[in-house]
Image (cartoon, helix red, strand yellow):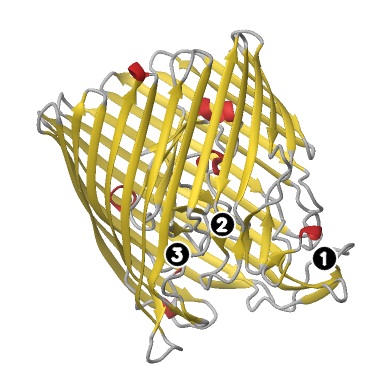
Amino acid sequence: MDGVSAEQMLERADYGVVEAITRTVGLSAGGTPGNGGLAFSSRGFYGVNSVGVAEDGMVLGVAAGTTAYPGDSWGYERIDVLRGPASLMYGSGTMGATVNAVRKQPSRTSSAEVLLGAGSNDTLRLGLGATGALGTYASYRIDSYTTRSAGERDLDNSRSGKFMSTLRFQPTSELQVDLIADRSVQNPSRYWGTPGVDGKVVQSLRDINYNADDSIVRYVDERMRAKLQWKANDWLTVRNELYHVQSDRRWRNIESYAFNPRTATVARSDYLEILHDLEQTGNRLGLNMDWGAHQVAMGWEAARINLRLSNNSPYGGASTVSAWDPVHGSWASPDVTAPKTETGVTQHALYLEDAWRINDRWLAMAGLRRDVYSFARHELVAGTDFDKTLGANSWRLGLTYALAGNTHVYGQVSMGHDPVTSLVSLNLANRSYALSKGRQAEVGIKQQVAGGRGEWTLAVFDIKKDDIITRDPERPAISIQGGRQSSRGAEFTAMFQATPALRLEGNLAYVDARFDQLIEAGGNRAGNRPLNVPRTTANLWGHYRVGAWQASLGLRHVGDRFANNANSVVLPAYTVADAALSWQMDQRTTLSLIGRNLADRFYVGSSYGSQFLVGQGRSFEITAHIRF
């Protein structure tokens, strides 16, 4: 497990979770407005049903392939990444990795921080954070953040804001109670991509948006939590968390564009309006026991998830506009938007994990988890209601050996599970399917060098996933479970303080991912690489400090990917350069000049259907970070 700290995110000016996470080894982004923007690829597996996103260990049930929270990195102490099957800790939907944002905590020592920023495309941002004591036994933490940008094209404007608050009561050193209330509102870009011809993006159309003037993309998240931690005695700590989350999402857009070069027009279709009313209430109870050489964690989790889905299926509507000077017009569809389904999911999980310190050199780890999901789906239109129960086991075995004080080797095997579709969106067509199962074997080595001035880590892994959806070879029109995919690869990370002034950080990942057995409507995909999975990713940062000044230069490389499982549409590899020049005015204030995509490289970040989402061009920003 590794990740990025708050200091690293500020140093690199990574204000979004996507930007911060894709600096870590092996993670690449594949977000779109349709999946909430938090879709990643890791170790050969892509999407919100294989790479989970959590906050303080709490995962929101994924509905209709969408994960949208948290969108920005302000207010988080660090963002951890646990790679490979993480079902033991987080449940289903974590075959590739889990991203976990860890909040900044209240302190009885008063402090505050402010972030101010302004830059290209009318970008503005403001972050506020404060903590301190309240009376004899209480403390608080408040973080607020807002940002807006006009974007690079019409209707590309975005804005978001959030408020995070924690009130902590600690009447004794053994008892701590946190009350947490958060609200986030995101209005991301309404850009659904640039059309292509013959599987390639039309670069001359990169700055044009074909959506409607009154289009909408909006995510509202409200979270309330009560957390208790009680150190009962020297060997037992009890933790309990009761939470309620509500997420309201709305899309109203024209999402499909077909470019006709002969007539210089774009045909628009898929006039979609979709609304999610998602609520999740749950409780997480954990016991941590320290029994000599054994550190045991066990617990029970329960949650109830309710989703009311409304849409205007079958998404009719069509229009044709000029490719170079489109009249955006208004969104209008012949299909009425109405509630279509109500789904309730009850989840229970039990887990047990033990870390056994055999001696000064050997550490053994073992864990087991059982998840059970009970579904009840009410079809408001079709009337085809159904119930379904799914269950799966996860386990992990690991061993770590200290070769020397500065060198450790490890090995582990684990098993996890993914849903064949978003768990909260199980429907009549896939009600008979079980959870897909995955197995991982991993070995690695971690070493400190040069008297602690540097360190490096190398991990090698092999993952196999069974029971993905495929077509029956004898009856190709029928979908069944039985497909398989696999990945194997290596990840390398390193940091070195070359001189008191020069620090280098970098990582490199290679993955060989493929479908071992998969038949789709268009043919046999065995041997193909899954969509949105690059073979190689790399990051390199150099930081040079002289007195109160620091210059930072970063390179990010993402290898080529495919936009479909047929591997017929290629998203070319790209490398972008970012930089930051910072001046520490005094002990409290740091001013920074930030440049992103310095070479103004044209690249495709991801795809949406037959469209290509073009990455951000060159931009600059000035920020001030002030601590009190």
Query: The residue tagged with tag 2: helix, strand or loop?
Result: loop
Query: In the image as oriented, which residue stretches furthest toward the bottom?
Result: 474
Examine the image and state in which quarter residue 408 appears: top left
- Residue at (41%, 65%) from the top-left corner? 514
Query: The residue tagged with tag 3: helix, strand or loop?
Result: loop
Q: Of 307 and 26, which appears nearest the observer?
A: 26
- Disc 1 packing (10 Å; few <14; some 14–19; many ≥20): few
Q: Nearer the viewer, mark 2 or mark 3?
A: 2
- Disc 2 packing (10 Å; few <14; some 14–19; many ≥20): some
Q: Position of residue 613 (x, y in %)?
A: 67, 57
| Cα separation between marks 2 and 3 | 27 Å
Q: Position of residue 137 (x, y in %)?
A: 38, 17
Amino acid on which the number 3 mark rests in the picture: Ser
Q: Of 289 and 579, which appears nearest the observer?
A: 579
Would you say the residues marked 2 and 3 are in contact, meaning their CB atoms lie under 8 Å apart?
no
Amino acid on which the number 1 mark rests in the picture: Ser
Image: 382 above or below 120: below
Q: Quadrant of the N terminus?
A: top left
Query: The residue tagged with tag 1: helix, strand or loop?
Result: loop
Image: 514 above or below 553: below
- Residue at (22%, 22%) from the top-left corner? 405
Amino acid on which the number 2 mark rests in the picture: Asp
| Cα separation between marks 2 and 1 | 37 Å
| Residue wearing tag 2 | 560
User: Seen in the image, is 592 located left or right of residue 82?
Assistant: right
User: Seen in the image, is 97 located left or right of residue 380?
Assistant: left
Q: Position of residue 521 (x, y in %)?
A: 50, 83
Q: Quadrant of the C terminus?
A: top right
| Residue wearing tag 1 | 330
The tag earlier along the polypeptide, 3 or 1, is 1
| Residue wearing tag 3 | 422
Q: Of 27 and 35, which appears nearest the observer?
A: 27
